[in-house]
Image: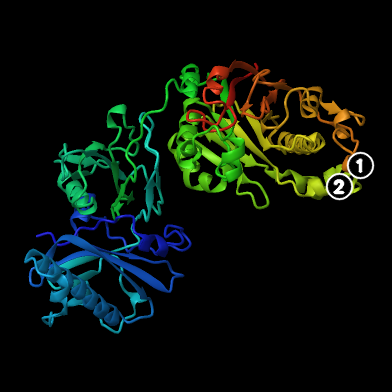
Amino acid sequence: MRICRSVLSASPCLHTFLARPLSTPSVAVKRMAAASPPSLADQLRQERLFVYHTPEDTHMLLRLRFRGTPAMGTLRRDRLFNFRRPKDEEVGRTLERMAQNLTSKITTRIKNKKAKKAKLDVAVVQEAPAEESESLAVSLRRSGKEIPSETLNGSTWTEGDQLLVDSAEFTICVNPPVIPTGKITKHILPNFPVDVTLDCDGVIEEQSIFVWLKQKTGKRSVDPIPFDFILSNDGQKIPSDLIAEALDDVLPHPGRDGWEVASVDKEWTPGKEHVGLLLSLLCLPIKDDVVGEPIALIAKNPIAEPLTEPIPFMRRHESCQQRAGSDGFRIVSYNLLADLYADQEASLKELFPYCPPECIKGDYRRQLTLRELIGYNADIICVQELDTKLFNSYYSKQMRRKGYEGLFLQKTGKAHEGIGTFYRTDKFRLLNQYDINITSELFENPANKDLADAVNSKAKLKEVMMTRTNPLQVCYLQDLDGSGRSVLVANTHLWFRPQYPRVRLLQMGVSLRHLQRIVKDVTAKDSTTPAIILCGDFNSSTGWGVHHLLNKRSVPVDFPEWKMFCTEDDEYVELALEHPFHLFNACGELQYTNYTAGFKAAIDWIYADAQQLDSRFVIPMPTEDELSAFTAIPSPVFPSDHIAIGCDLHWKA
């Protein structure tokens, strides 16, 4: 009779204990590997006790599921027990506490269950003299021999040891791959892959197994599994009865309609026919032939109604079904609208009052954003206003699954957002990064002393410049086509205040100087000159000084924007700026890239190296009817107040 099943249900205890990854090589406790681990199926059949700790920890976490023994009685389902014990505690003391806890919890539940069955008042039964329950016999063994009770915990609980609880035997498994927590989005959209976040530790997702279930109304049990087994990544068979046992353990009983298997894959897309149903996800975390505690996630909300069609970005995707040719690449730039700005009360009431509150939420918008980005089939994607937390926990992982590697540069200061660049790993190889904070580069790099001296001489301008946190991300990528050609992709987000065009001019001037130095160094080192791409949210529409500098390669001392909007002499400087690059506007003159109720203009741009690249295709823009369908954007079908722009750039012969 199977007494225990090892299944994890998004445990807060485990998540709290695993405050830092167990899989980091410098801190990982090495597994005592046998010649070869048991098969995945055999591991799932075993009764296992999981041990989690790192060398630096003073305590270890012991986890097992237990329902009782034939002698004391058994519960219908396993109960999860967590024991957090000091490493310097004698193992005998730990086993004593385990025996007391297991005995007490199981016997109390069995008594209460009997009282309920007999329709007695549980409270009265509990007040009656309790029968003495003999404590469970608990021991720890290694190679069949009992480990002395005076041994410290830190020296035992090793891989392959056995814990005996009366007649039940548990195999010790140390620091297996684990998913402490996970979450299914609150907004599950038909025709969109379900947005699920998994906090993986030492888990290889490509090796792991995922089973999606959908609620089947009118039933109160799990349907028979419609397959005999699941094949793991390396071809191992996991029988359906083991999947069924895991599901039976973790799905709620009773009071919830039954479930049926929807898909066996990491990603699943519900259809319109699934509207109103709940979803669940069973995950079996695996790494290097070791399977850890399965985790079950259940969505809090049912699948929502589908989005209003047509969805504008899907129309744009129709022209992007094929990737750029082998002699070029597709690049996209997109200001995502950071959650930390969108969720502010001022944004909801003043900036975007036309957007339904549920559609401004981050877990709603990011699904649309990810789907939109992937659908452009780009080779390079540059984004702005990317939340730091979302890059680490969401976008970097999701984009990696789609074949991209992501790089992130956070703004300095208190804003937890920044800019990111994603590139296809089958198209480009990262050679180097040359990221800067533009303000730091201005004041701290001796090469900019002339600019810094001029700004330092104007108190009010200096004060403004010193508080700017705008970044410039520069990625040096090599095309994998064998030609040896390379590109410097510069991604930035300039200051947004309309009355400060002089600040944006200075920021662009510093950025171009930085690129000039990189090109000089790279050319000397690699004997090849990389192509330049400069893109992002410039917060400057056509005709302003930033574009004059980019297109004309210089601005004079008496350029009008130096003094524009200034009332005092120390608010501005008059400088000549120049750069050596021959750049062109790769997407042409666009009408809008930002479209809100209060502001509409083209402020996002992609400039490219005219000497090495030309533009042969521009991703079609949404129509104004689409942009204004819900007054403005963001909206239920536009996740940002900006519009993604993109084009195909081809190498010149």
Q: Quadrant of residue 589?
A: top right
Question: Which residue type does callout 2 highlight?
Answer: Lys
Q: Residue 460: give its label.
A: 2
Q: Quadrant of residue 556?
A: top right
Q: Quadrant of residue 508?
A: top right
Left or right of residue 443: residue 39? left
Q: Position of residue 268 (x, y in %)?
A: 33, 35
Mark before the other along the chain sequence, 1 or 2: 2
Task: Mark 1: give few (<14), some (14-19) or many (20+) Cα within 10 Å.
Answer: few
Asked which secondary structure carries label 2, the reply is helix
Q: Is residue 1 visible?
A: yes
Q: Is residue 210 visible?
A: no
Q: In this picture, is 644 found above or below 233?
A: above
Is disc 1 in contact with disc 2, using a CB cutoff of under 8 Å?
Answer: yes
Which of 528 and 125 lies nearest the eye of the viewer? Answer: 125
Color encoding of the figure: rainbow
Q: Residue furthest bottom?
A: 150
Q: CA distance from mark 1 to mark 2?
A: 9 Å
The structure residue drawn at horizontal position 16% and vertical position 45%, both measured from the top left corner, is: 220
Q: Which residue is mark 1?
A: 568
The structure residue drawn at horizontal position 80% and vertical position 28%, both measured from the top left corner, is: 545
Q: Residue 496: give its label.
A: none
Which of 610 and 306 lies nearest the eye of the viewer? Answer: 306
Asked which secondary structure carries label 1, the reply is loop
Q: Position of residue 553 (x, y in %)?
A: 81, 26
Task: Mark 2: give few (<14), some (14-19) or many (20+) Cα within 10 Å.
Answer: some
Q: Position of residue 131 (x, y in %)?
A: 10, 81
Q: In this picture, is 248 found above or below 384?
A: below
Left or right of residue 380: residue 652? right
